[in-house]
Amino acid sequence: MEFAENNSEYNWSDKIILIAEDEIMNYLYLEEALRETKAEVVWCQNGKDAVDKVVKEKIRFNVVLMDVKMPLMNGYDATKLIKKFAPKIPVIIQTAYAMQKEKAKGYEAGCNEYLEKPVKQDRLLSTISKYII
């Protein structure tokens, strides 16, 4: 795991990022990759909880990092529901499923971007910076 020394160009201290990821090591990697941006990070371990945070708790996330394969509700279904309720929230799918058919499913569900795991920190940050609201 290699992280850039200085990501001061990304100051998201006023931003909230939702990470929907069931694997703790993947979550910890993403949390560390985002640490120097100073963004607030909220973690959900399944798609249903991610939807609840947006729909029921009405948390105004600035971006969502969505895994595909999760318990209770997969990332595609969670993305559809989040986009139905809050269409302006950018959703970036990040998954090991990199086949073209899977990417198409992600875009059909409403995601803004599709990142393949393992995601390098610089790619993650530059992608988020394109979409964060």
Image (cartoon, helix red, strand yellow):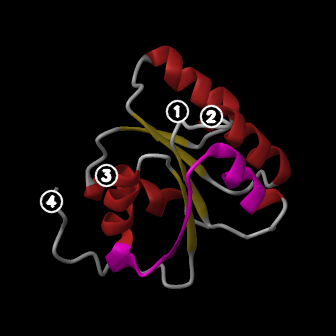
Image position, residue 15 (x, y; %): 56, 77
The quadrant in which the C terminus is found is bottom right
Q: Earlier in the sequence, mark 3 or mark 4?
A: 4
Residue indicated by mark 4? 2
What stretch of residues is rendered in magenta? Answer: 35-53
Which numbered tag is attached to residue 53?
none
The structure residue drawn at horizontal position 61% and vertical position 31%, both measured from the top left corner, is: 107
Q: In front of the other: label 2 or label 3?
A: 2
Q: Earlier in the sequence, mark 1 or mark 2?
A: 1
Residue indicated by mark 3? 123
Q: What amino acid type is highlighted by mark number 2?
A: Asn
What is the total number of numbered labels drawn onto the structure image? Answer: 4
**Label 4–label 1 contact, CB within 8 A:** no
Q: Earlier in the sequence, mark 2 or mark 3?
A: 2
Residue 31 lies in what quarter of the image? bottom left
Residue indicated by mark 2? 74
> CA gap, disc 2 to disc 4?
29 Å
**Label 1–label 2 contact, CB within 8 A:** yes
Q: Earlier in the sequence, mark 4 or mark 1?
A: 4
Q: In front of the other: label 1 or label 3?
A: 1
Q: What amino acid type is highlighted by mark number 1?
A: Lys
Question: In this view of the protein, can residue 54 be seen by the observer?
Answer: yes
Residue 80 lies in what quarter of the image? top right
Image position, residue 13 (x, y; %): 49, 84
> Quick one: SS at disc 3?
helix
The structure residue drawn at horizontal position 60% and vertical position 37%, both measured from the top left corner, is: 71
59 with respect to 100 (left or right): right
> Quick one: SS at disc 4?
loop
Q: What amino acid type is highlighted by mark number 4?
A: Glu
Q: Nearer the viewer, residue 61 or 78?
A: 78
